[in-house]
Structures are given as structure tokens and as C-alpha cells.
Image: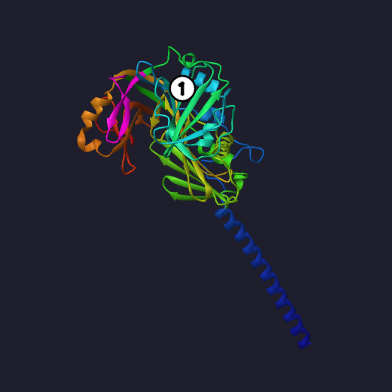
């Protein structure tokens, strides 16, 4: 009898141990689920995901084409009377010119080593020059200006190239320089003369070529009149951009990097949202590595960048191509900047940079704040080129490599900004300074 009780008692003990183990495992699973939910918390409260299907791209700005984005910042006209004028890239003159170039055919290039037999730079006589962005431009991007061309990828050219007419009113000559070689090509099937492009209502600012050390600076000939403008600021919600970049926003992991910066990642891609004085900025980067052996021209890479921006928020403001940089491992980086009244806008508003490798976008940095509505303006007289040089003095001008006129951003409040005429000074050490165009006094882009 005692033996049976012992056997029954041992079985009961084993059952209790088994039940206790099961309960313990259930508790572990529940704790694991809770822990996973805490780690993979999805999007924070300020980011809402409300779309019915995956990978539907949000569009907050405008859709653009390569032709619409790759356009000159300015046109430079040298007249038969030896006068130089600047016309803004957003003018009717520039629009008509670009339309005609799209219908033209550029013939083969002929290279001339610098010397007696090389074409003069700039060309002698009347010409029309186009300046693209603020740096050097790959030849393959210039090819996108024309309907047909058989140019090869010769490298980067100066952002300024020249268009001159010949005895045939529908035939032009294109001239630009790469290193110590001047290239020239005939342009045919352009049915208009140079005089046709000029619109009488466009502002043509007289300029002078001022000798400056071993180079020449293009600066206003006289005290031109510009405007001081006040604008409201518009914002794009970060959630809209995040929603368009990730295939499944519900799988995002959120990390607070600092009080002003949040990181969203799905493990292979990441987007950081940073709060600045001007509003939110985002930086996108992917960990996936494209095939290095796949070769894409600068034109194809720009096309990939434009397409990506179109599918992920669109272009804000009047952004156009500003700069192209060839980085390591075949990667290219394109910068875009805004234009106001035909002048460059200097500052963090509307800034956009896209990195492309082997035809795929691998990074994007952009501001989510852009100009809304103009609410006030007044005229302001600016210094001429010679007056500016005198105000700066010899100590400051000694390190200057180039000077550009445009509008600087002065933040008035969270939703108001003032645009002020400023001169941008590029220095030998690759730094940039700004001065008020009206006085020559230092100007800061950091706001008030």
C-alpha cells in the first residue's frame, strides 16, 4: 500500500513540474512578444501610415523632366557694340532658346589645342553664352540639350559655353573648352536667328569683365536695382516623405539620435529627420551596394536622380541643376538649387542633393521647407562691380576666386523669410562668404 502511494506521489510531482515548465515557456513567449513590440515600435506618433497598399509614392511638389531641370542659370549676351548683358535662366528668352535647341542637331566635335590655330575664347564678335550651375558640367549632360548629337563623353567642361551665328541664319557654332583644348561643333536645324530669342520684357542687366589677378570677373557694370522680398514658408510633413521611401512603413524601427533628430530604418535603408531653424531636413541612404562594373553616363545618372525625386515627393519650388560631382566607385552626386527672379537663391531652403551609383539612387538629402507666397517687396540699389571691389579692400579680395550675385535668405520667424540681394564670394580655401550687395557688409545665412 505504501509503495503505491509513493508511485502515485512521484507521478503527480512530475506532472506539476511539466505544467510549471509549460507556464514558464508561455511567459517567456509573451515577454518576447512584448520586447519585440518595444524594439520594433514602428513609426512614432508624428508619423502616420494610412495608405491602403505598399509603395505608393507621395507627391508634394512638381514632376519634372531632365529638360526642365537641366537648364541654364543665366544667359550672357555680347553685342556687336561690345556690350555684355546678363539675362536670367527663368526668362522668356531662355525658354524660347531651350525650346529651339531641343529641335536642333549638334554635329561632330572638332578639337583644337590651345595655340594660334585654336578658336578664341570667348569667341570674337556677337555671341550668346549659357552658364549651367556653379561648377563644371559633364559633356553628356550638354548632349541632352539637343534633339540629336553624336558627341562622346569627353569629361567635364566649364559651365559656360558659347553659341554664335554664322552667315546661314539657321546654323550656329557651339564652342567650349576642356583643359587645354577648345572644341567646336556645328548646330543645324535651329530655325531661328539669335535676335528671335530676346524678349523685350526680360530684365537684361549690364555687366563688365573686370580684370582680377590672372582671371576676369563678371560683375554688374553699374548700380543695378534688385528687390528685397518677404515670403511665407511652407512645410512638407516628414511622414509624407518617409511613407514614399519605404516599401512597408509598418516595419520601421525608430531611433532617437538627439533631441532634434530621429532615424527611421527597415534594416537596409535609413532616413534621418533633423529639425533646423528653417524646418525639417531629411537624409536618405541605402546599405545595398550597386554593381560597380555597370557604367552609366552622367545623363543617365541625372535621369535616375530626377525620376527618383519625382517618385518621392516631387520637386519643391523652382529647383534646377546646380552642380555635378564624380565621387569614388563611379558614384555621381547631383545638386539642385532654387532660382528667384532669374537669380540664384543662397541658403538652406529648397536644397536638394541626390547620389547615384550604377544607375540607382543611393542617397538623397533635401530640405522640406520651401517658399510659399510673396507678401512684400521693395526696390534696393546694389553696388556695381567696381564699387564692391573697392568696399572689400585688397586684404579681402586677395583670396577671392569668383563672385556671384543672387539672393540670400534671412529668417524672420518660423514661417517668414526675407530674401536680400547679396554677393557670394568663393575663396581659395574652398570656403564661401556673403556680403550685402547694397553695402558690402558681411551677411550671414544663419538667420536672426
- Side of 269 where 91 appears, left or right: left
Identify the magenta region.
205-224
Most extreme residue toward the top, as rendered? 200
> With respect to residue 83, does 176 lie above or below?
below
Q: Quarter of the image holding residue 189? A: top right
Residue 10 within the segment the image draws in magenta: no
Magenta stretch, main secondary structure, is strand
Estimate how packed mark 1 is, as few (under 14), some (14 to 19) or many (20 or more) residues with alpha carbons within 10 Å.
some
366 or 83, which is in the foreground?
83
- Residue 210 within the segment the image draws in magenta: yes
User: Which residue is labeled 1 in the image?
Assistant: 164
In the displayed image of the protein, which residue is found farthest to the front? 116
- The residue at the point 76 percent across, 87 percent down is 2
Indicate the quadrant containing the N terminus: top left, top right, bottom left or bottom right. bottom right
Q: Is residue 293 above or below residue 376?
A: below
Q: Position of residue 387 (x, y in %)?
A: 23, 25
Give the image location of residue 264, x and y in percent.
53, 47
Residue placed at 32% from the left, 30% from the top? 217
Q: Quadrant of the C terminus?
A: top left
Residue 23 appears in the rendering: yes
State the image coordinates of residue 286 (x, y, percent, origin top left): 55, 49
Image coordinates for residue 386, horizontal then vertical, percent: 25, 26
Does the image show residue 351? no
Residue at x 54% of width, y 25% of height: 187
Image position of 49 (left or right of 338): right
In-front residue for pair 281/212: 212
User: Element type at marker 1?
Assistant: strand
Q: Which of 238 and 221 lies nearest the eye of the viewer?
A: 221
How was the colour assigned to the protein in this rendering? rainbow
Amino acid at each position: 500500500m505504501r509503495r503505491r502511494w509513493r508511485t502515485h506521489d512521484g507521478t503527480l510531482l512530475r506532472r506539476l513540474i511539466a505544467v510549471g515548465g509549460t507556464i514558464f515557456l508561455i511567459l517567456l513567449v509573451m515577454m518576447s512578444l512584448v520586447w519585440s513590440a518595444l524594439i520594433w515600435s514602428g513609426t512614432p506618433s508624428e508619423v502616420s501610415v494610412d495608405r491602403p497598399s505598399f509603395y505608393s509614392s507621395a507627391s508634394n511638389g512638381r514632376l519634372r523632366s531632365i529638360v526642365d531641370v537641366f537648364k541654364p542659370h543665366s544667359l550672357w549676351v555680347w553685342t556687336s557694340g561690345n556690350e555684355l548683358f546678363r539675362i536670367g535662366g527663368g526668362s522668356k528668352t531662355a525658354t524660347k532658346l531651350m525650346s529651339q535647341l531641343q529641335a536642333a542637331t549638334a554635329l561632330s566635335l572638332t578639337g583644337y589645342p590651345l595655340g594660334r590655330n585654336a578658336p578664341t575664347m570667348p569667341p570674337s564678335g556677337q555671341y550668346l553664352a549659357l552658364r549651367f550651375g556653379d561648377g563644371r558640367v559633364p559633356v553628356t549632360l550638354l548632349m541632352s540639350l539637343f534633339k540629336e548629337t553624336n558627341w562622346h563623353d569627353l569629361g567635364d567642361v566649364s559651365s559656360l559655353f558659347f553659341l554664335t551665328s554664322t552667315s546661314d541664319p539657321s546654323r550656329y557654332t557651339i564652342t567650349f573648352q576642356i583643359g587645354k583644348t577648345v572644341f567646336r561643333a556645328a548646330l543645324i536645324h535651329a530655325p531661328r536667328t539669335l535676335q528671335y530669342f530676346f524678349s523685350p520684357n526680360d530684365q537684361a542687366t549690364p555687366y563688365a569683365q573686370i580684370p582680377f589677378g590672372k582671371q576676369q570677373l563678371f560683375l554688374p557694370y553699374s548700380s543695378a536695382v534688385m528687390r528685397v522680398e518677404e515670403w511665407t514658408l511652407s512645410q512638407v510633413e516628414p511622414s509624407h516623405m518617409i511613407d514614399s521611401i519605404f516599401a512597408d512603413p509598418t516595419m520601421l524601427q525608430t531611433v532617437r539620435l538627439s533631441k532634434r533628430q530621429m532615424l527611421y530604418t527597415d534594416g537596409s535603408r535609413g532616413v534621418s529627420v533633423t529639425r533646423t531653424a528653417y524646418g525639417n531636413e531629411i537624409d536618405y541612404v541605402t546599405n545595398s551596394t550597386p554593381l560597380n562594373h555597370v557604367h552609366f553616363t552622367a545623363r543617365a545618372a541625372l535621369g535616375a536622380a530626377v525620376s527618383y525625386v519625382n517618385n518621392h515627393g516631387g520637386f519643391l519650388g523652382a529647383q534646377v541643376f546646380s552642380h555635378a560631382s564624380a565621387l569614388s566607385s563611379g558614384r555621381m552626386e547631383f545638386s539642385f538649387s532654387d532660382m528667384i527672379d532669374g537669380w540664384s537663391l543662397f541658403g538652406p531652403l529648397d536644397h536638394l542633393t541626390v547620389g547615384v551609383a550604377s544607375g540607382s539612387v543611393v542617397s538623397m538629402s533635401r530640405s522640406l521647407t520651401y517658399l510659399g507666397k510673396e507678401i512684400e517687396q521693395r526696390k534696393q540699389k546694389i553696388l556695381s562691380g567696381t564699387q564692391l571691389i573697392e568696399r572689400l579692400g585688397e586684404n579681402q579680395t586677395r583670396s577671392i576666386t569668383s563672385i556671384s550675385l543672387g539672393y540670400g535668405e534671412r529668417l524672420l520667424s518660423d514661417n517668414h523669410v526675407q530674401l536680400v540681394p547679396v554677393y557670394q564670394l568663393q575663396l581659395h580655401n574652398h570656403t564661401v562668404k556673403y556680403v550685402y550687395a547694397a553695402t558690402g557688409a558681411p551677411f550671414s545665412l544663419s538667420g536672426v
